């Protein structure tokens, strides 16, 4: 499908902001990115911006934190209101992408209170499409859990050491008696002396 002139222009404006993977590279671009969101009114252009947000992988914490602090979440809430009642496939697809972006963003109680994004997402829970309903309900539950258990939010999973543990070969100390050839006699006293020490070696007791 041929892209509109507006979308081509938008992609040109984004060219310095995004990396090879199509995601935002640095937090310093976020203010300008949110301004582009505010200026973009057509579905195709909004989808281009959302895809850039979804593909962001570098410095994710700093970028998403900056996005939340400069009005990015409020802008997503406005887009939800613009498209939630439209039944066209483009609008439903955009709502799916908005929910996917919100699912990646770190959301706190303060952000929910300041942006009222929870109210906007709850409105999608009543959407006629079951898939959108389920996605919105899951996001609301995730946020509710984050508020009730703030210390559990974004905590990295504990490593499973049982999966990565490498069993090292066990070693056993073995003492060997010196062969009789290495025991020397004193020709003057005719006494035998062992001038060598016991040999010590280690063997792998797990080997066949």
Image (tube, rainbow, N blue to C red):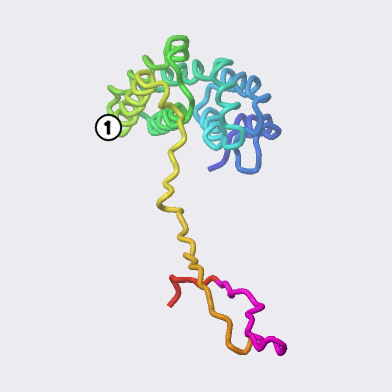
Q: Position of residue 42 (x, y in %)?
A: 52, 25
Range covered by the magenta-colored residues: 184-201
Left or right placement of residue 29 versus residue 92 in this view? right
In front of the other: 198 or 115: 198
Q: Count up the numbered dots.
A: 1
Q: Position of residue 133 (x, y in %)?
A: 30, 28
Tell me which residue sits at (43%, 14%) in the image. Answer: 109
Residue at image mark 1: 130
In front of the other: 80 or 54: 54
Tell me which residue sits at (56%, 16%) in the image. Answer: 69
Where disc 1 sits, the SS reads helix
Above-or-below relation of 33 to 112: below
Above-or-below relation of 181 to 123: below
Quadrant of the image for the C terminus? bottom left
In front of the other: 163 or 193: 193
Q: Position of residue 66 (x, y in %)?
A: 59, 21
Query: What is the quadrant of residue 102 in the picture?
Result: top left
Characterize the local packing of mark 1: few (<14), some (14-19) or many (20 or more) Cα atoms within 10 angstroms.
Answer: few
Q: Position of residue 110 (x, y in %)?
A: 46, 12
Above-or-below relation of 175 to 41: below
Q: Is residue 198 magenta?
A: yes
Q: Is residue 200 magenta?
A: yes
Tell me which residue sits at (40%, 32%) in the image. Answer: 96
Tell me which residue sits at (27%, 27%) in the image. Answer: 128
Left or right placement of residue 186 versus residue 92 in this view? right
């Amino acid at each position: 499908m041929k892209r509109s002139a507006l979308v081509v222009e938008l992609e040109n404006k984004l060219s310095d902001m995004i990396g090879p993977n199509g995601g935002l590279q640095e937090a310093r671009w976020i203010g300008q990115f949110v301004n582009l969101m505010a200026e973009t009114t057509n579905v195709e252009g909004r989808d281009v911006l959302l895809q850039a947000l979804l593909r962001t992988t570098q410095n994710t914490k700093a970028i998403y934190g900056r996005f939340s602090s400069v009005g990015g979440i409020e802008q997503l809430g406005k887009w939800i209101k613009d498209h939630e009642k439209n039944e066209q496939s483009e609008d439903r697809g955009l709502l799916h992408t908005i929910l996917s972006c919100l699912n990646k963003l770190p959301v706190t109680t303060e952000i929910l209170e300041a942006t009222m994004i929870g109210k906007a997402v709850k409105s999608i829970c009543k959407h006629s499409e079951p898939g959108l309903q389920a996605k919105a309900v899951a996001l609301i539950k995730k946020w509710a859990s984050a508020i009730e258990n703030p210390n559990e939010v974004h905590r990295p999973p504990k490593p499973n050491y049982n999966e990565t543990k490498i069993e090292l070969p066990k070693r056993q100390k073995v003492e060997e008696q010196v062969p009789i050839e290495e025991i020397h006699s004193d020709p003057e006293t005719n006494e035998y002396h062992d001038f060598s020490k016991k040999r010590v070696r280690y063997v792998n007791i797990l080997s066949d």
